[in-house]
Amino acid sequence: MSRYHNPIHAPVFPSQLSSYSSLSGALAPPPSQFASSRRRRVPQNVCKTTNGPICGPIGFDYIGQAGQGVSLADFSARSQNAISQMVAGANDQVLAGTGTSKINLRIMWTGYEHLSFVQSMPASPAMSRGQLGASIAMQFWSFVGRYLPVTRSDQLQSNSGIQVVRSLFWKGAGSTWTVM
């Protein structure tokens, strides 16, 4: 079955698939790997916490594609209504119970650790997963815009057409959150 996601057509849910196959267990990808051969998870430097995370990681996945992440382009270009039809749990209030009023977002790009980027953004316990994803996407493009005029040896772009996908968001030290 193709893992291609098309927002025009409704996704095929796992409950609609036949599980009849002697190889079905052998073909399931581990949850930490992307099913697409075109995607690679970039190793991350984890931000150390002083007193542990207050809440677990917040995942971002397309409906029916657990562990695959969501393209930042989708969060940037689509309306909240479109996002709610594409992203699993898009209307869930993921910050409820955290008492969070602002998030210090830290973006750490492997190989560009010297480009330290921590940006404060407003948040509320009523914020949905879709709204949080869109807000993070805006901050990511701010990061790219700030460091776009870097020297050739520090270039953030590629001729191979890199697509950035966000899969997790977790709380680190103090009010700092990290995107993966």
Image: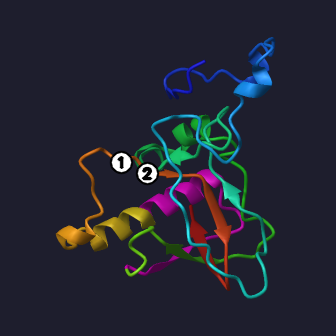
Along the line of sight, the residue nearer the viewer: 164 or 46: 46
Numbered range of the magenta stretch: 115-138
For the residue marked with disc 1, what is the amino acid? Ile
* Residue 36 vertical placement versus 43 (above, below): above
* Residue 95 vertical placement versus 59 (above, below): below
Residue at mark 2 = 164
Q: Is residue 77 magenta?
A: no
* Residue 5 vertical placement versus 142 (above, below): above
Q: Is residue 56 left or right of residue 2?
A: right
Rendered residue at 54%/45% (across/down)? 70
Q: Is residue 90 left or right of residue 3?
A: right
Q: Is residue 135 magenta?
A: yes
For the residue marked with disc 2, what is the amino acid? Val
State the separation of the CA atoms marked 2 and 1.
6 Å
Label 1: element kind: loop
Q: Position of residue 151 (x, y in %)?
A: 19, 73
Q: Which mark is residue 162?
A: 1
Q: Is residue 136 left or right of residue 102?
A: left
